[in-house]
Structures are given as C-alpha cells and as structure tokens.
Image (cartoon, coloured by chain):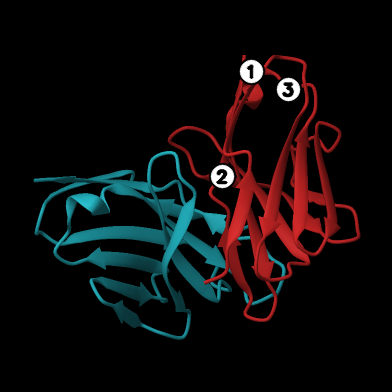
Chain colours: A red, B cyan
Amino acid sequence: GAVVSQHPSWVICKSGTSVKIECRSLDFQATTMFWYRQFPKQSLMLMATSNEGSKATYEQGVEKDKFLINHASLTLSTLTVTSAHPEDSSFYICSALRLASNEQFFGPGTRLTVL
Amino acid sequence: GEDVEQSLFLSVREGDSSVINCTYTDSSSTYLYWYKQEPGAGLQLLTYIFSNMDMKQDQRLTVLLNKKDKHLSLRIADTQTGDSAIYFCAGGSNQAGTALIFGKGTTLSVSS
C-alpha cells in the first residue's frame, strides 16, 4: 500500500519555540493532505486541509497564525507550530489523499511535548 | 455535521470474539472505515465498507452495516493479545478531498 511518512516522530521543545513537522507521501502524489491532532485518550480532530499550491483551509477554532501549513509540492506538507506552549503538546497525525482511489493514507504521527 | 459515537472500552479474553460498535449521524457517508491504533503509533486502516453494502468479511474481521439504524460494527474473531489497541470508526463522503470524521475510539483489552 501507499506510504506516508512524518518527521520527526517525536520532539521535545521549550515553550516559545517553533517546531516544524513534515508529512511526505513516499510513492504517490497527494494534492491534498490533512492534519489531525489527537489528545490523550481522545479522537482525532481535523485541524486543517492542506492543498498543494494554495492556502490551507483551517477548521473552526484552529488558529492559522499559530499552526502554519505549507504544501509546497505534491509529496510534502509541513505543519509549523509557532511559539509553542505546553497546551500544544499533542500527537499530530497527517494523512495524504491519493486521488486516483480517493483513499487516505495516514502517517505514523509526531508526538510533540512542549516544556 | 457528522457525529460518530463509539463505546469507549471493551475487555475480552484471548480466543473470544470482540464486537466493537459505532453509530453515525450523517447518512451521506459513503465510506465507513475501521482503523487500529497501537500505543504511540499512527493509524492503520483495517478495513472499510461502502454504504451500499451490508457486510464485509476479511479474514478474522467482519464488518456489519445497518444503514437504517446508522450502526456499524467490527467483529474480530479469535481475538489475540496483539489485537489490543484503540479502534476508531470513521465516516467519509464520496467527495474527493474530504477529511474523515472519527469516533473517540474504543480501547480493546485482550487478556490471556
């Protein structure tokens, strides 16, 4: 099946710093990628839809200036958590949409811990 | 919008069958999925069913869909300790480019 990678798999940072998370589709092109967030023992919540070559669409309640999304190529989307705070600590998961089959493939997730 | 509900916890003994239930609200969901998440890991697609199907079987997994009641279930036969994980059901539309709506997940605990 199709493979989606995320980097890094985990990151610890100090409060106030920015963290970039990459999501790559390794063997297919993805014009659309999704970023989800998962708090402990909770479901995945969609944060934003990332479209190649255009601005991301953010879900209600998600600050676009805090969670910067860039989808610069058909295989890469990045999520930058700017000025991270402890409440941003979470598990961030991306998925990539393979348009030919309308299937979403999920990355392994990135665990962010903000001290 | 779509709302997906699941029971939060299920405990079974090794070798028994597990049945995880899910209800959804949006009848326009054309795909319904079951994902497995092991601790600290991402999501693994287990199986999915189209809304025009009643049942789908894939080895130890059986998915039942009652479209009238908007009820989806996942049955795992001969449950093993390696099946211990969180199971999410998710709904999606046929429209390309739409995200999935997830339930809160059911934690399956399998004891030997």
Q: Nearer the viewer, residue B33 or B58?
A: B58
Residue A15 visible in the snapshot:
yes
Tell which subunit mark 3 falls on.
Answer: A
Q: Residue A12, how many percent across, how many down?
A: 61, 22
Where disc 3 sits, the SS reads: loop
Quarter residue B98 falls in = bottom right
User: Spatial distance from mark 1 to mark 2, Cα to Cα?
Assistant: 18 Å
Labelled disc at residue A109: 2
Question: Mark 1 is on which residue type?
Answer: Pro
Marks 1, 2: nearer the viewer: 2
Quarter residue A49 falls in = bottom right
Tell which subunit mark 1 falls on.
Answer: A
Where disc 1 sits, the SS reads: helix
Is B3 displayed left or right of B70 in the figure?
Answer: right
Q: Residues within 10 Å of mark 2 (few under 14, many from 20)?
A: many
The answer to whether A95 is drawn above or below residue B11 in the figure is below
Labelled disc at residue A84: 3
Q: Residue B2, how many percent across, how many down?
A: 58, 59
Q: Residue A72, how many percent across, how many down?
A: 86, 55
Residue B2 visible in the snapshot:
no
Tell which subunit mark 2 falls on.
Answer: A
The answer to whether B78 is drawn above or below residue B54 in the figure is above
Q: Residue B44, how many percent across, how many down?
A: 45, 58
Q: Residues within 10 Å of mark 1 (few under 14, many from 20)?
A: some
